[in-house]
Amino acid sequence: MLGIAALTTTDIGRPCGPRLQLFLQRFLRRFLRRSAHIGVLLALLGGLFVAANASPSIFPEDAAFLNVGYNNGVAVDGGLELVLPVEFVDVSVGAELYAPLRDFSDDWTVRLSGSGLVFPAFNVAASLPPLGLGLGTDVNYGADGFSAHIGPMFGTDLLFSFDLPITVSAYIGLGFSEDPGLSLAWAGQIRYYFDDLADNLAVELSSTDLLPISLGVRYLF
């Protein structure tokens, strides 16, 4: 019995020490890396709320949305946009979840974003509708890691020039991501508002870096 106990301690106990130590070191490194990412994400989100939509739109509005589109397979994204009570500048923030239906665990992304409408009606030419100009930003975390972007937004409301309940807007943001380094985010939306049928409903045709082509619905509240 004494020999068996000694054999167990000597031959089995010793190798477990380095293995456990290596496991703990790897776990700690991963935990600290993930914690750092989450910390940066929360800090940038706080900055958005203090300084300033899911993929940024030039026209802020309180809305919930759901889009279905294609990106190497059918995918969905949905979320919420809220207008902030900021004087002099129309500001909104939003959260969006992108998920491919084929394999959610392989390519999901959570996007937090903000937009500020700096110039609501910039007249480019007398024959053209007024152009809205603003600034947008987005922060992303998902299966591909962390990324953040900032850039200009522009758009127009066709209701004022052609009496059509349609808005067109675009955003392009330059930033960085964890994997390739320099990266680009974009969003383009065409929205039709059913003013005659329902004051709180709109459909949207959009293209973003997360979902290149999609069609969705927005519920305004």
Image (cartoon, rainbow, N blue to C red):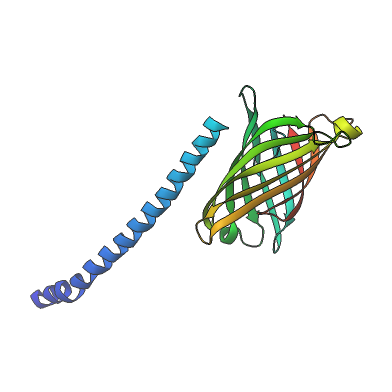
Image position, residue 154 (x, y; %): 72, 40
Give the answer, above or below, for where 219 lies relative to 14.
Answer: above
Residue closer to the observer: 23 or 89: 89
Towards the viewer: 178 or 144: 178
Q: Which residue lies furthest to the left in this view?
A: 2
Q: Residue at x 62, y 21 (%)?
A: 87
In this view of the protein, which residue sits in the foreground, 42 or 156?
Answer: 156
Up the image or down, 179 lies above or below 54; here it is: below
Residue at the image position 38 percent from the left and 57 percent from the top: 30
Side (left or right) of 114 relative to 42: right
x, y percentage for residue 133? 71, 36
- Quadrant of residue 10 in the image? bottom left
Q: Which residue is drawn at 75% across and 52% down?
A: 214
Image label count: 0
Residue at the location (74% across, 47% down)? 188
Is 167 left, or right, of 186 in this rendering? Answer: right
Specify the quadrant of the image occupied by residue 192. top right
**Is there any visible trace of residue 25 in the rendered image?**
yes
Please state the horizontal and vertical placement of residue 53, each as a whole percent of the image.
Answer: 65, 39
State the quadrant of the C terminus.
top right
Residue 194 visible in rendering: no
Give the position of the N terminus as an image quadrant: bottom left
| Residue 106 vertical placement versus 92 (above, below) | below
Q: In this view, does 24 lie to the left or right of 211?
A: left
x and y, in percent, of residue 78 in the image: 67, 45
Q: Which of 151 and 33 is in front in this view?
A: 151
